[in-house]
Image: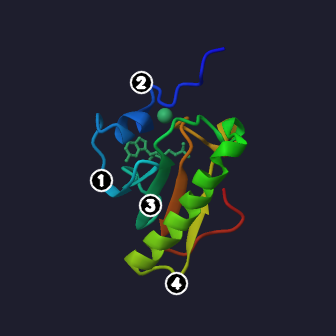
């Protein structure tokens, strides 16, 4: 049995995590990175990713539960640090085609700075 690779050399967000592709980083640790989206959908639009390659939410395993929990803790920390925690913000995971996922390495969108519509488009 071969082990699942923890990075994919063809994956954009693995390459950002590895420092091969530049990004406007907001946070980095061995486990997580956060960086500004290059095509922001709100005045603040930050992507929070694990450094490990996980293609979609469907590929998560029980061992990823802590990492995914810490993605949300980081979102709330960034919201407090950047001063929009009380005003409000939205966190989104898109999974696969119908949800509009375009980069197949899981990422939590952290959006803030405008009124968000509901239901989402
Ligand atoms: P998805 O559509 O998969 O939920 O979200 C992918 C996000 O990645 C999009 O919001 C898109 O603007 C962003 N994105 C795509 N390419 C790059 C890039 O090279 N750098 C950064 N910082 N964001 C990117
Ligand atoms: Zn990846």
Q: Position of residue 98 (x, y in %)?
A: 70, 40
Q: Which residue is mark 3?
A: 45
Q: Which mark sits nearer the N-terminus, 4 or 2?
A: 2
Q: Residues within 10 Å of mark 1 (few under 14, many from 20)?
A: few
Q: Position of residue 109 (x, y in %)?
A: 53, 56
Q: Residue furthest top?
A: 1
Does the numbered disc 1 mark a residue whose Cβ is under 8 Å from ligand 1? yes
Q: Please state, as top left, top right, bottom left or bottom right, where the C terminus lies in the image.
A: bottom right
Q: Which mark sits nearer the N-terminus, 1 or 4?
A: 1
The residue at 47%/72% (across/down) is 77
Q: Which mark sits nearer the N-terminus, 3 or 4?
A: 3
Alpha carbon separation for disc pair 2 and 1: 20 Å
CB contact under 8 Å: marks 3 and 4:
no
Q: Which residue is mark 4?
A: 87
Q: What is the number of the mark on residue 9?
A: 2
Q: Is residue 113 visible?
A: no
* Foreground disc of the pair 4, 2: 2
Alpha carbon separation for disc pair 4 and 2: 39 Å
Q: Which residue is mark 1?
A: 24
Q: Residues within 10 Å of mark 2 (few under 14, many from 20)?
A: few
The residue at 58%/63% (across/down) is 72
Alpha carbon separation for disc pair 3 and 2: 25 Å
The residue at 58%/52% (across/down) is 67
Q: Is residue 17 visible?
A: yes
């Amino acid at each position: 049995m071969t082990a699942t690779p923890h990075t994919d050399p063809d994956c954009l967000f693995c390459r950002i995590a590895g420092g091969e592709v530049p990004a406007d980083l907001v946070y980095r640790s061995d486990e997580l990175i956060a960086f500004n989206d290059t095509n922001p959908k709100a005045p603040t639009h930050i992507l929070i990713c694990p450094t490990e390659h996980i293609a979609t939410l469907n590929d998560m395993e029980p061992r990823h539960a802590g990492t995914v929990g810490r993605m949300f803790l980081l979102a709330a920390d960034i919201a407090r640090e950047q001063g929009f925690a009380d005003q409000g913000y939205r966190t989104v995971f898109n999974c696969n085609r119908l949800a509009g996922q375009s980069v197949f390495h899981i990422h939590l969108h952290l959006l803030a700075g405008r009124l968000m519509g509901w239901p989402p488009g």
